[in-house]
Image (spheres, rainbow, N blue to C red):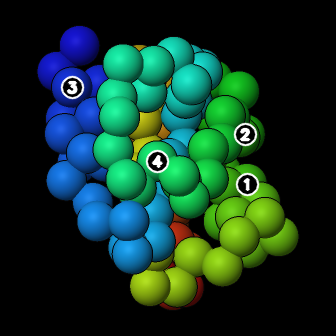
Amino acid sequence: SDAALLCRQVIAAQPATHKAALICSGDKPERLLAELAAPALQKLPLYQLPEKKAALTQLNDDLMRALRPQNRLLILLAHASLWQTFTTEELREWTRTLAAWL
């Protein structure tokens, strides 16, 4: 898919010194990166979320427990159908919550 290709390109362009993390909803991050050989992969934390609305709404809390997100590129790959389960106001609140610590 175009989204997966974009994720691979962004990750491949990261120098080994940059901090990043890949979060996939529904798909296994290892499958996405199987053919990719990039210096950034050595330190790239991989996370997999269930393809459920509740998983995305709890993402903020989960990331704060699992990793220090400040000064880190977070790449979130989630199917468009998952985002369609949110109302406009829920999406606004979700982005406000994440923006508070990014």
Q: Which residue is labeled 4 in the image?
A: 41
- Amino acid type, mark 3: Leu
Q: Quadrant of residue 76?
A: top left
Up-down: is 66 above or below 50? Answer: below
87 relative to 47 in the view: left or right: left
Distance from disc 4 to disc 1, alpha carbons, whole Å, reads 26 Å
- Which badge, 2 or 4, is on the more N-terminal residue? 4
Q: Nearer the viewer, mark 4 or mark 1?
A: 4
Q: Tell me the kind of residue under disc 1.
A: Gln
Question: Horizontal placement of 49 versus 1: left or right?
Answer: right
First-in-chain label (4 vs 1): 4
Callout 2 touching callout 1 (CB < 8 Å): yes
Alpha carbons under labels 4 and 3: distance apart: 16 Å
Q: CA distance from mark 2 to mark 4?
A: 28 Å
Rate crowding at label 2 as few (under 14), some (14 to 19) or many (20 or more) other CA atoms within 10 Å. few
Mark 2: amino acid = Ala
Badge 1 crowding class, 10 Å Cα cut-off, few under 14, some 14 to 19, many 20 or more, is few
The answer for how far apart the CA atoms under marks 2 and 3 are is 26 Å
Front label number (3 vs 1): 3
Q: CA distance from mark 3 to mark 1?
A: 26 Å
Which residue is identified by label 1? Answer: 58
Work out whether 41 lies above or below 21: above
In percent of the image, x 57 and y 76: which residue is there? 69
Q: Quadrant of residue 87?
A: top left
The kind of secondary structure element at disc 2 is: helix
Q: Mark 2–mark 3 contact, CB under 8 Å?
A: no
Say if 9 sits above or below 94 in the image: above
Q: Would you call the spot at circle 4 few (<14 residues within 10 Å), some (14-19), or many (20 or more)? A: some
Specify the quadrant of the image occupied by residue 33. Answer: top left
- Tag on residue 5? 3
